[in-house]
Amino acid sequence: MMVHAQSKATEAPLLVAHRGASYEAPENTVASVKLAWTKRADATEVDIHMTRDHQIVVIHDKSTKRTAGVDLSIAANDYASLKDLEVGSWKSPDYEGEPLPLLEEVLQHVPDGKQIFIEIKCPKEVLPYLKQVVQESGLLAQQTVFIAFDWETIRQTKLIFPSSACYWLSGFKQDKTSGTWEPSAAEVLERALEAKVDGVDVSHSGPVSAQFVAAAHEKGLEVHVYTVNEIADARRVMKAGVDGITTDRPLFLREQLGL
């Protein structure tokens, strides 16, 4: 568990490129990850799914339809059926021919001193195979961060990667009548503590406040937020003292916030 010696409200938040620098490049590709570094991101985030033959591919959706134009289930196909798919031209003709990458290929493009947030979108059965890929990558433990919405998945991930940061992802829904949030900020922090992870990664549109962040830090938990592309939102969560901001536009936020 990461322990805060003091509040991080006075420190600059980590800027994490969402699915790579996905405002300009096709999400979850080697191109978007490489672009993230030129856009001065501190870290990049990617999503993973596992194929039928236990290969880990970098893609957000369960199917290849949205980014490849061909409707193939990741989990129901071997990698051999997916490896020649093209996932760049939907974003821009400049990226025509960009392949659907394996996680191991993306990890090769994480420079020294930078981090990669790996969002586990598939069932927890991926974890032994994920451990092997990450170990073979040669990245230091502090360069790999794991995030997942599924509570049991992130709990088990922390057991498998004890030296890497693991954050539980959570969204929020607000009752239109009462204005209360579900889950509550307190519930999110309590669940994170139960999972023995290092923090939470929550929607910036939820109850993210200085009080929430301070409460998390007092419990030894970090607070990261997603996905922030507007300056007003970025300034609000930065003022609250969050530890990290996930964005499609890392360089834009860095310049506008003076980081």
Image: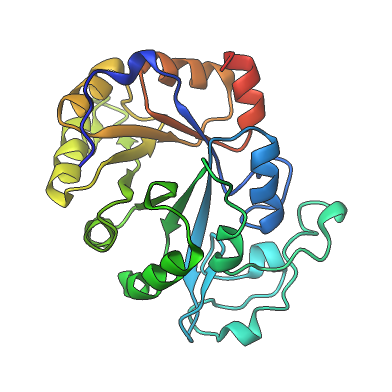
User: What colour scheme has been applied to the protein in the rendered image?
Assistant: rainbow
Instruction: State how many labels appear.
Output: 0
Where residue 100 appears, as percent x and y from the top left, is 66, 68
The residue that appears at 38% across and 46% down in the rendered structure is: 142
Q: Quadrant of residue 199?
A: top left
Q: Position of residue 200 (x, y in %)?
A: 30, 39
The quarter holding residue 229 reads top right
**Toward which corner of the image does residue 178 lie, by quadrant?**
top left
The vertical placement of 229 against 171, above or below, is above
The picture places residue 228, in percent across and down from the top left corner, at 52, 31
Residue drawn at the location 62% of the way across and 70% of the way down: 64
| Residue 101 vertical placement versus 52 (above, below) | above
The answer to whether residue 1 is left or right of residue 90 is left
- From the viewer's perspective, tell me whether residue 204 is left or right of residue 38: left
Q: Nearer the viewer, residue 258 or 65?
A: 258
Question: Residue sitting at 70 percent across and 44 percent down?
Answer: 35
Image quadrant where one finds the C terminus: top right
